[in-house]
Image: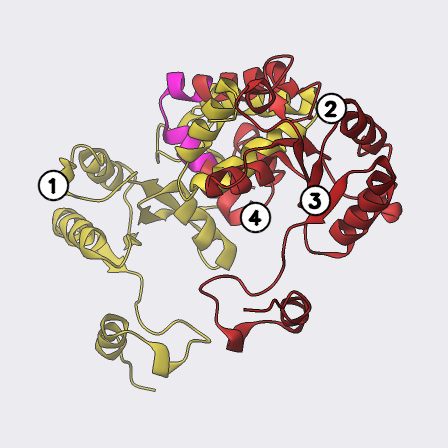
Chain colours: A yellow, B red
Amino acid sequence: MFFSPSITRLVEVFRRLPGIGPKTAQRLTFFVLSMGKEEVQEMARALVEAKQRVRLCSRCRNLTEEELCSVCRDERRDKTLLCVIQEPRDMMVIEKTGQYRGRYFILHGALSPVEGIGPNELMIPQLLRLIEDERIKEVVIATNPNVEGDATAYYIADAARPLGVRVTRIGFGLPVGGDLEYADELTMTRALESRRVI
Amino acid sequence: MFFSPSITRLVEVFRRLPGIGPKTAQRLTFFVLSMGKEEVQEMARALVEAKQRVRLCSRCRNLTEEELCSVCRDERRDKTLLCVIQEPRDMMVIEKTGQYRGRYFILHGALSPVEGIGPNELMIPQLLRLIEDERIKEVVIATNPNVEGDATAYYIADAARPLGVRVTRIGFGLPVGGDLEYADELTMTRALESRRVI
């Protein structure tokens, strides 16, 4: 190699990030080397500090720097409505709609026997306790529409129903603005299953 | 916002990198938060150390951790052949061919009056001195095939020719494996200009 060890190392570090291939890692490395020293130090500090400060909300497992996250602290939220999602980023997608005013529970994954991820790893017992303790009226399951997400949704629905709570799952079908012509078979199947009288 | 300050800050830091939009910055941030503490610290260290250690080769302005870069130190290189490139990454593209055995000079940019980048910013006087001092026989200009790269190539060619050196520029035309049908007009024009007797 004609690049020096610390350059090569920075390229390798960037490559560990998701979606960053060798070309991009190189481009990012050269960019960092062209940045000001202070700016690079600030970047390094932001990494370490985020990792140090951020922990999981003790109620919903959202990322937070406090005991409870800002959503759980928000008194205007409907406390009888609980949305179950796989990842913290999924919350953003739902919040953006402005249509959901309940709170959340974040699984940080989905059931996957192959990877050794069972109900305990997803803190499902904690979720069920929360449903009981907080007298939740409706659990909206918003796991991903794939094998793991489906399995997780069914597992939670089966476990929560005996607690006398209404369990729903977000709808699947054609994306708005999508073209029927380009819909894949699975989406189309779901769309047919989800048909409603108009 | 429903994310904490240090998360927001890390997203902003990632967004400063080239080609990283808001979605990717968010994805990278969540990934970093899922990494081990040690790994994040290692990443931060790699950033700071690369920036601290890497400087420009005193001869060719390549990135290096020593006085001279590994290419300039390589005694097997043809010292009478000099390739002028815009960026350190361009060296990689040329080295990969295995066809070039000379040395380099890196401009770190191209002439751009609008941005205030003139010959001095690109160290072109230093380049001309090097051509004289090292008795270079051929200067291969490999700046980009765009307005700035062309202007830079012509400027260097005009300045170097009086020194009695052969000045060439890499060829332009259809990319190998490319399809004539998809060639843009400028590439096609260059391809016609570069035609050779076969």
Q: Main secondary structure of the magenta part?
A: helix
Of the pair A82 and A169, the residue shown nearer to us: A169
Q: Mark 2 — on which chain does it sit?
A: B
User: Residue shown at 12%/51% (left/top)?
Assistant: A158
Q: Is residue A185 above or below residue B10?
A: below
Do callouts 2 and 1 mark residues in contact (Cβ within 8 Å)?
A: no
Reading the chain from its start, which is encountered first: label 4 or label 3? 4
Looking at the image, residue B162 sits to the left or right of residue A161; the answer is right
Residue annotated with mark 3? B141
Q: How crowded is mark 4: few (under 14 residues within 10 Å), some or many (20 or more)?
A: some
Nearer to us: label 4 or label 2 = 2
Mark 1, secondary structure of its residue: helix
Residue B66 location (% of width, % of height): 60, 13
Question: In terms of secondary structure, where does tag 3 sit?
Answer: strand
State yes or no: discs 2 and 3 in contact (Cβ < 8 Å): no
- Residue at mark 4: chain: B
The three-letter amino acid code for the residue at tag 3 is Ile
Residue B100 located left or right of residue B34: right
Q: Residue at x 51, y 19 (%)?
A: A6
Q: Where is residue B186 in the image (x, y as percent from the top left)?
A: 68, 69
Q: Which numbered circle lies on residue A33?
A: none
Q: What residue type is labelled 1?
A: Val
Q: Distance between the residues labelled 3 and 1?
A: 55 Å
Give the class, few, some or many, for how many residues have Cα within 10 Å of label 1's Cα (few <14, many ≥20): few
Numbered range of the magenta stretch:
B29-41
Per the rendering, the mark at residue B21 is: 4
In this figure, which residue is indicated by the disc labeled 2? B134
Instruction: Tell me which numbered mark, 2 or 3, is placed earlier along the sequence.
Output: 2
Residue A71 in the image: state x and y as whole percent. 46, 39
Q: How many marks?
A: 4
Residue marked by disc 1? A114
Instruction: Please state which of residues A56 and A114 is positioned toward the viewer in this rendering.
Output: A114
